[in-house]
Amino acid sequence: MKYILTFTFLFTIGNFVFGQDIQGDISWLNNDDLEYDMLLKAASIDDSLKEMTPSMFFVELELTEEQLSVVKSISNNKWLDLLTNESTDFAANLTLHYLFEKDAISLYRIKREDWLIAEKEKDIDYWKNYLQNIEKQKIKEE
């Protein structure tokens, strides 16, 4: 019984802490309206560390402060809902790439239709695991 109560408490706190309710309008976060660019960050070499950082592609979005605040308030469960909704899946994926500065080489010169076939399931799995790990890290830090 103790474990059930602990789990329920952590789940409830987790939902509260990680933005169960979206703090604003996300109607702009859809596949038809979201505009983005892809930026290439060239490879760099740090001679002092003898390390090379490879070239990477990043998603660039022009979000207002309000929009950025809203997307930062979206819960993990809501992100997963957005990723599996046919009206928002690609836009949600692009936004997550932008927020977490994930290499977006797989999205370079790809249309949503191609992404659905080749990358969608892999991206959903990636974000599900990534967001869960962030949530676990936040709980540990408390």
Image: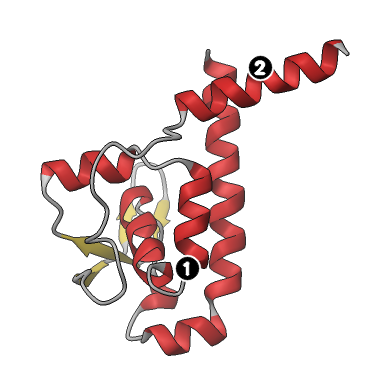
Q: Is residue 54 visible?
A: no
Closest to the observer, 36 or 25: 25
Q: Residue at x 53, y 77 (%)?
A: 119
Q: Position of residue 38 (x, y in %)?
A: 24, 72
For the residues labelled 1 and 2, the Cα–Cα distance comes to: 29 Å
Quarter in which the N terminus is drawn: top right
- Hey, which quadrant is residue 94 in on the image? bottom left
Q: Quadrant of residue 104?
A: bottom left
Residue occupying the point 34% across, 67% down: 91
Q: Is residue 73 left or right of residue 60?
A: right
Which residue is nearer to you in this view: 39 or 64?
64
Question: Three-letter amino acid code at disc 2?
Answer: Phe
Q: State left or right for residue 85 relative to residue 8.
A: left
Coordinates of residue 108 in the picture (x, y in percent): 34, 80
**Vertical order, 11 against 99 (above or below):** above
- Three-letter amino acid code of the residue under disc 1: Asn
Percent coordinates x, y for residue 44 in the rendering = 30, 59
Q: Secondary structure at mark 1?
A: loop
Of the pair 106 and 31, the residue shown nearer to us: 31
Q: Residue at x 34, y 42 (%)?
A: 48
Res 18 seen here: yes
Which of 41/66 is in front? 66
Q: Residues within 10 Å of mark 2 (few under 14, many from 20)?
A: few
Q: Could you say whether the residue bearing mark 2 is in a helix, strand or loop?
A: helix
Residue 12 numbered mark, or none: none
Q: Mark 2 = which residue?
A: 9
Of the two numbered discs 1 and 2 on the same chain, state the one appearing first in sequence: 2
Mark 1, residue position: 85
Seen in the picture, residue 26 relative to 107 is either above or below; the reply is above
The colour scheme is secondary structure
Disc 1 + disc 2, Cβ < 8 Å: no
